[in-house]
Image: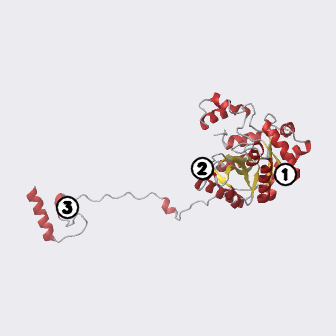
Amino acid sequence: MDGFGLPEEHVARIKELGMSAVALTEHGNVSSHVKLEQAALAHNVKPIFGIEAYTAMADMRETQNQRKWHQTMLAMNLDGYRNMMKMVTRAWADDFYRWPTVTIPNLKDNQEDIIMTSGCADGHIPSQLLGGKGLEPDYDAAVKVLKAYKRILGDRFYLETQRFPGLERTKLINQQYAIWSKEFKVPLLATSDVHYPKPEQNEMQKILHAAGRNTGTVAAAEAEWEYDILLTYPTSDKQIFDDLRATGLSKRDAEAAIDNTQEVASRCNVELPKMDRIRYPGTVDDLKPWPPKKKPPRLTREQSFDTGSTKDGSTEDSTTSARRRKRRTRSA
């Protein structure tokens, strides 16, 4: 448990701030997509459907590594959305290992028409670059991973720069991404890593972490997380620009990262598939009240004896029926 607020609350907040599109990426599942679309349409906001997938190598069970990288994925069109559904289904059905996990083979098999980013600070590339999620820092290995994603995804891969100058890890990642963006021709992308609609709701995130991560108390959760870094929406383009600059990005790189968010929004165009309404054939007569059900006539004891019916519903001749009545009389 990490995020807070229903899709309606998030969409209402971005509408209030004057934004035109929003991407929703839950950890490991897509259960809120329908509500996102309903809220977005109601507020005239463009919904972008995605997932923050838990990813790992295919040998995670053999190595007993339960650590997962975080991978941001966005469906570009209906084919991409279907591929995302296949990916998520396979993650739950075949590769559930502590969490529903998108293995690298699964990612390769279902990546068509999906935009992917390098993810947050717990992504595969940052973890390989700076260490984390069971990996030791290894610059060359990080470059190898970046090239692999570039090879698989082509122009559908972005380096995700986040707006948190208060986090030293974010500053190191953003500055390195700016260098790699030029070297390997991978565009930068600005994100806000939003977890709740409004700043004051970070108190709820503490409670969610305490419960979901089994820390025992909110105080213990506070000791493991930088809650003074607010994971909510920027109030203006200037704010996110200033934040990106403060992480070490140049003016040009910060502007490019922000511009590319609009590019990604324009590339993602999905309307969720709908089922046709189930209609039963009928006429207006079917709407009329049914006639009252007639009760069967009640039989007297003698009439019931004369029916000549056995318990299993078969019939019997009058002689057999008379013998049966005689036996009943004697036993009485």
Residue 76: % across, % down: 75, 57
State the separation of the CA atoms marked 2 and 3.
67 Å
Closest to the observer, 63 or 159: 63
> Can see residue 78?
no
> Can see residue 128?
yes
Q: Earlier in the sequence, mark 2 or mark 1?
A: 2
Q: Amino acid at mark 3?
A: Ser
What secondary structure is found at the residue carrying circle 1?
Answer: loop
Q: Which residue is mark 3?
A: 304
Q: Earlier in the sequence, mark 3 or mark 1?
A: 1
State the separation of the CA atoms marked 3 and 1.
90 Å
Q: Amino acid at mark 2?
A: Tyr
The quarter of the picture where the N terminus appears is top right
Mark identifier at residue 97: 2
Q: Which residue is mark 1?
A: 187
What secondary structure is found at the residue carrying circle 2?
Answer: strand
Residue 234: % across, % down: 79, 38
